[in-house]
């Protein structure tokens, strides 16, 4: 994939991914996966930072389904933020969700601002996991939780040729880390109650369904909007992704950790 207008998640990409994953979502699982990331946690009335809010579906789910008091969604590109703001406005939730453009780097918030820091399949774009975890720790209130899903690489060291080909096809500046590196980064930042839970078994099945849909009626419908060439590019990406899911080298995971109270 190539950037359009200087953005990786441009309007055609947003349209393509929403066709696969649902309105407002740019990664798998939709509201159900948001719920699984939050499993067992009560965020009702809490202040939540969503790192990489994308097209807004995550933040709507955090408020509508989980009762978050206020969600601050941040992202680095205008196209996704415009889409998120339009969905938030359509839902009448401007008073409970704010979508803010930020520059890559330190989070632009004072220490101890949020009860929860959430992210869904977005921090894969941030290569320095240690710096990220230090920032997440800093902006959390004592006792606050980091809860996220992300796309991990299953082992340390250079990727296999198959994994390198998949990452190159994605073209989305992936900075994948291993489970061990995430655990180390969270521990060094000061977090406790750290967990990393693989979602590989789930997604390697779901990805096959997504590929079949891309090759079928859904793909044909999407092609009328984004063009057949763009759909074919995505079919190529999914075809490269499934073997590295099967090998375990591509390892979607849930991450959770607590800042001591």
Image (cartoon, grey):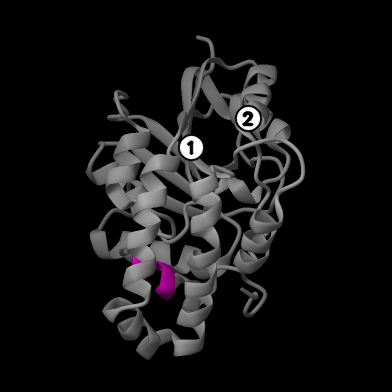
Of callouts 1 and 2, the N-terminal one: 2
In the displayed structure, does residue 54 sit left or right of residue 222? right
In the displayed structure, does residue 47 sit left or right of residue 234? left
The prevailing secondary structure element of the residues shown in magenta is helix
How far is mark 1 from mark 2, CA to CA? 11 Å
Instruction: Determine which residue is flagged by label 2.
Output: 182
Q: Nearer the viewer, residue 2 or 69?
A: 2
- The image's mark for residue 253 is 1
- Determine whether 222 is above or below 251 in the image: below
- Determine whether 102 is above or below 14 in the image: above
129 is within the stretch colored magenta: no
| Residue 65 falls in image quadrant | top left
Q: Nearer the viewer, residue 219 or 241?
A: 241
Q: Nearer the viewer, residue 50 or 20?
A: 20
Crowding near pointer 2: few (<14 within 10 Å), some, many (20+)? many
**The residue stretch that appears in magenta:** 15-20
Furthest-right residue in this view = 158
In the displayed structure, does residue 65 sit left or right of residue 57? left
Q: Position of residue 167 (x, y in %)?
A: 65, 59
Disc 1 vs disc 2: Cβ atoms closer than 8 Å?
A: yes
Q: Residue at x 65, y 45 (%)?
A: 176
């Amino acid at each position: 994939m190539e950037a359009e207008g200087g953005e990786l998640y441009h309007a055609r990409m947003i349209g393509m991914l929403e066709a696969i994953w649902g309105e407002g979502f740019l990664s798998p699982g939709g509201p159900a996966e948001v719920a699984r990331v939050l499993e067992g946690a009560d965020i009702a009335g809490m202040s939540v930072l969503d790192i990489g809010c994308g097209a807004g579906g995550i933040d709507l789910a955090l408020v509508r389904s989980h009762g978050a008091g206020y969600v601050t969604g941040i992202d680095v590109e205008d196209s996704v933020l415009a889409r998120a703001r339009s969905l938030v406005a359509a839902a009448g939730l401007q008073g409970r969700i704010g979508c803010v453009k930020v520059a890559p780097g330190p989070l632009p918030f004072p220490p101890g601002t949020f009860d929860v820091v959430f992210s869904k399949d977005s921090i894969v774009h941030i290569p320095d996991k240690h710096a990220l975890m230090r920032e997440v720790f800093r902006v959390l209130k004592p006792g606050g939780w980091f809860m996220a899903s992300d796309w991990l690489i299953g082992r340390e060291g250079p990727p296999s040729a198959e994994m390198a080909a998949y990452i190159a096809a994605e073209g989305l500046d992936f900075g994948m880390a291993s489970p061990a590196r995430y655990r180390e980064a969270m521990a060094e930042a000061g977090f406790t109650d750290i967990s990393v839970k693989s979602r590989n078994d789930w997604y390697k099945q779901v990805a096959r369904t997504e590929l079949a849909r891309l090759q079928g009626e859904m793909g044909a419908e999407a092609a009328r909007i984004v063009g057949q060439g763009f759909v074919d590019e995505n079919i190529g990406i999914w075809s490269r992704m499934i073997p590295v899911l099967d090998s375990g080298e591509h390892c979607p995971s849930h991450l959770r950790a607590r800042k001591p109270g």
